[in-house]
Amino acid sequence: MDPDYSNYDLTELVEARESIDRNAHIHRYFKICQEIDARVIQPKEIQRLNSRNNFSNLVFVKVIFSLLSIFFTHKLFIAFTDSYISWRGKTNYYAQQSPNVYYLLVAVNVFFLLFCVYLVVTNRWANKLNA
Protein backbone atom coordinates (compact mmCIF):
# COMPACT_ATOMS: atom_id res chain seq x y z
CA MET A 1 0.00 0.00 0.00
CA ASP A 2 1.43 3.34 -1.06
CA PRO A 3 1.24 6.34 1.27
CA ASP A 4 -0.97 9.29 0.28
CA TYR A 5 1.55 12.01 -0.54
CA SER A 6 -1.12 14.66 -1.11
CA ASN A 7 -1.46 15.02 2.68
CA TYR A 8 2.26 15.70 3.14
CA ASP A 9 3.58 19.24 3.26
CA LEU A 10 6.50 20.32 1.09
CA THR A 11 9.24 19.76 3.69
CA GLU A 12 7.96 16.24 4.42
CA LEU A 13 7.92 15.49 0.70
CA VAL A 14 11.51 16.64 0.29
CA GLU A 15 12.58 14.55 3.30
CA ALA A 16 10.74 11.52 1.88
CA ARG A 17 12.42 11.99 -1.52
CA GLU A 18 15.86 12.20 0.09
CA SER A 19 15.35 9.17 2.32
CA ILE A 20 13.68 6.80 -0.15
CA ASP A 21 15.65 4.13 -1.99
CA ARG A 22 15.29 5.29 -5.55
CA ASN A 23 16.03 1.95 -7.20
CA ALA A 24 13.87 -0.18 -4.93
CA HIS A 25 10.80 2.10 -4.93
CA ILE A 26 10.88 3.84 -8.29
CA HIS A 27 7.09 4.25 -8.38
CA ARG A 28 6.98 5.97 -4.96
CA TYR A 29 9.94 8.16 -5.87
CA PHE A 30 8.17 9.23 -9.07
CA LYS A 31 4.94 10.04 -7.18
CA ILE A 32 6.87 12.12 -4.63
CA CYS A 33 8.61 14.05 -7.41
CA GLN A 34 5.28 14.68 -9.13
CA GLU A 35 3.74 15.97 -5.92
CA ILE A 36 6.71 18.30 -5.29
CA ASP A 37 6.54 19.63 -8.86
CA ALA A 38 2.80 20.22 -8.55
CA ARG A 39 3.27 22.23 -5.37
CA VAL A 40 6.13 24.31 -6.76
CA ILE A 41 4.57 25.01 -10.19
CA GLN A 42 1.03 25.69 -8.95
CA PRO A 43 1.82 29.01 -7.18
CA LYS A 44 3.61 30.23 -10.32
CA GLU A 45 0.55 29.51 -12.45
CA ILE A 46 -1.75 31.20 -9.95
CA GLN A 47 0.56 34.21 -9.92
CA ARG A 48 0.50 34.32 -13.73
CA LEU A 49 -3.32 34.19 -13.78
CA ASN A 50 -3.48 36.95 -11.17
CA SER A 51 -1.10 39.11 -13.20
CA ARG A 52 -3.34 38.71 -16.27
CA ASN A 53 -6.38 39.66 -14.21
CA ASN A 54 -4.54 42.64 -12.72
CA PHE A 55 -3.48 43.76 -16.20
CA SER A 56 -7.06 43.73 -17.48
CA ASN A 57 -8.22 45.62 -14.37
CA LEU A 58 -5.40 48.12 -14.85
CA VAL A 59 -6.36 48.72 -18.49
CA PHE A 60 -10.00 49.22 -17.50
CA VAL A 61 -9.10 51.71 -14.76
CA LYS A 62 -6.77 53.62 -17.09
CA VAL A 63 -9.50 53.89 -19.74
CA ILE A 64 -11.98 55.22 -17.17
CA PHE A 65 -9.52 57.79 -15.85
CA SER A 66 -8.60 58.80 -19.41
CA LEU A 67 -12.27 59.52 -20.10
CA LEU A 68 -12.50 61.47 -16.84
CA SER A 69 -9.44 63.47 -17.91
CA ILE A 70 -11.16 64.36 -21.17
CA PHE A 71 -14.27 65.42 -19.24
CA PHE A 72 -12.33 67.68 -16.86
CA THR A 73 -10.34 69.14 -19.76
CA HIS A 74 -13.57 69.98 -21.56
CA LYS A 75 -15.01 71.64 -18.45
CA LEU A 76 -11.87 73.73 -18.04
CA PHE A 77 -11.86 74.68 -21.72
CA ILE A 78 -15.43 75.95 -21.43
CA ALA A 79 -14.55 77.75 -18.19
CA PHE A 80 -11.70 79.67 -19.80
CA THR A 81 -13.32 80.39 -23.15
CA ASP A 82 -16.80 81.39 -21.90
CA SER A 83 -15.76 82.66 -18.44
CA TYR A 84 -18.24 80.50 -16.55
CA ILE A 85 -18.22 77.10 -14.94
CA SER A 86 -21.23 75.01 -14.03
CA TRP A 87 -21.55 73.04 -10.85
CA ARG A 88 -23.58 69.83 -11.02
CA GLY A 89 -25.21 71.08 -14.21
CA LYS A 90 -27.61 73.40 -12.38
CA THR A 91 -25.78 76.55 -11.42
CA ASN A 92 -23.43 78.62 -13.55
CA TYR A 93 -20.75 80.65 -11.82
CA TYR A 94 -19.35 83.54 -13.87
CA ALA A 95 -15.88 84.99 -13.39
CA GLN A 96 -17.23 88.56 -13.29
CA GLN A 97 -20.13 87.96 -10.87
CA SER A 98 -18.58 85.57 -8.34
CA PRO A 99 -14.83 85.28 -8.96
CA ASN A 100 -14.07 83.47 -5.68
CA VAL A 101 -16.40 80.56 -6.40
CA TYR A 102 -15.42 80.52 -10.08
CA TYR A 103 -11.72 80.20 -9.32
CA LEU A 104 -12.37 77.66 -6.55
CA LEU A 105 -14.29 75.44 -8.96
CA VAL A 106 -11.60 75.89 -11.61
CA ALA A 107 -8.98 74.86 -9.03
CA VAL A 108 -11.04 71.79 -8.05
CA ASN A 109 -11.35 70.77 -11.71
CA VAL A 110 -7.62 71.30 -12.27
CA PHE A 111 -6.87 69.15 -9.24
CA PHE A 112 -9.10 66.32 -10.47
CA LEU A 113 -7.66 66.61 -13.97
CA LEU A 114 -4.08 66.35 -12.69
CA PHE A 115 -5.04 63.46 -10.41
CA CYS A 116 -6.62 61.54 -13.31
CA VAL A 117 -3.63 62.19 -15.56
CA TYR A 118 -1.30 61.03 -12.78
CA LEU A 119 -3.23 57.76 -12.42
CA VAL A 120 -3.20 57.20 -16.18
CA VAL A 121 0.51 57.93 -16.64
CA THR A 122 2.00 56.15 -13.62
CA ASN A 123 1.77 52.58 -12.38
CA ARG A 124 3.05 53.25 -8.88
CA TRP A 125 -0.44 53.20 -7.38
CA ALA A 126 -1.21 49.87 -9.11
CA ASN A 127 1.97 48.30 -7.68
CA LYS A 128 0.84 49.29 -4.19
CA LEU A 129 -2.49 47.55 -4.78
CA ASN A 130 -0.78 44.35 -5.89
CA ALA A 131 1.59 44.23 -2.92
Image (cartoon, rainbow, N blue to C red):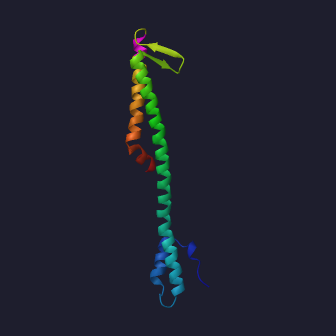
Q: Main secondary structure of the magenta part?
A: helix
Residue 70 x, y percent position in the rendering: 44, 31
As for residue 101 lying within the magenta part, the answer is: yes
Q: Is residue 95 above or below residue 107?
A: above
Residue 103 x, y percent position in the rendering: 39, 17
Residue 13 x, y percent position in the rendering: 49, 76
Residue at (40, 28) in percent of width and height: 111
Q: Which residues are magenta?
A: 98-102
Residue at (44, 81) in percent of width and height: 18
Instruction: Name the image quarter holding the N terminus.
Output: bottom right
Q: Is residue 61 above or below residue 80?
A: below
Residue 62 x, y percent position in the rendering: 45, 41
Q: Residue furthest top?
A: 97
Residue at (51, 82) in percent of width and height: 30
Q: Nearer the viewer, residue 73 or 54?
A: 73
User: Relative to residue 13, is residue 103 drawn left or right?
Assistant: left
Q: Nearer the viewer, residue 117 or 35?
A: 117
Q: Is residue 67 above or below residue 91?
A: below
Q: Residue furthest right?
A: 1
